[in-house]
Amino acid sequence: MESKSARLTVLIDPVKKEAFEKLCAAQDLTPSQVVRQLIRDYLEQHGVTWKTRSTIGSRTRR
């Protein structure tokens, strides 16, 4: 999971926002969680890689 956050402001139609928030709540997710997942999926779909945490001092577990 990412350790630092940056703000992304998005303008959206109020009706869609309400529907999105209701759907998220019904799935016990926050809108931020869903948007972060959508962004990760979009980046992966387009072959973009990113680094979320330092590899210094970390070990790979099997």
Image (cartoon, rainbow, N blue to C red):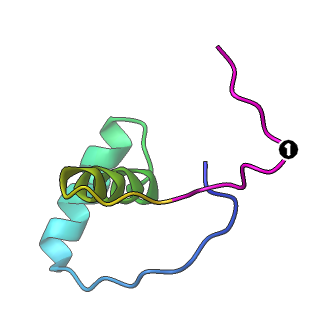
Type of the residue with mark 1: Gly
**Nearer to me, 34 or 59:** 59
* Number of dots carrying numbers: 1
4 magenta-colored? no
Determine the residue positioned at 19% across, 51% down.
Answer: 45
* Position above or below: 14 against 55: below
In the picture provided, is 9 more to the left or to the right than 59? Answer: left
Extreme residue toward the top, this view: 62
Res 51 quadrant in image:
bottom right
Determine the residue positioned at 69% across, 59% down.
Answer: 3
* Position above or below: 30 against 60: below
* Quarter the C terminus occupies: top right
For numbered disc 1, what is the local secondary structure?
loop
Extreme residue toward the right, this view: 57
Decide: few, some or many residues near mark 1? Use Cα within 10 Å; few <14, some 14-19, many ≥20: few
Res 43 quadrant in image:
bottom left
**Nearer to me, 18 or 58:** 58
In the picture provided, is 27 more to the left or to the right than 28? Answer: left
Relative image position of residue 12 (x, y in whole percent): 20, 80
Determine the residue positioned at 23% across, 57% down.
Answer: 42
In the picture provided, is 5 more to the left or to the right than 30? Answer: right
**Nearer to me, 28 or 36:** 36
Q: Magenta region, mostly helix, strand or loop?
A: loop
Relative image position of residue 34 (x, y in whole percent): 35, 51
Determine the residue positioned at 69% across, 20% down.
Answer: 61
Res 39 quadrant in image:
bottom left
Relative image position of residue 59 (x, y in whole percent): 77, 31
* Residue stretch in magenta: 51-62
53 magenta-colored? yes
Relative image position of residue 21 (x, y in whole percent): 31, 57
The residue labelled by disc 1 is: 57
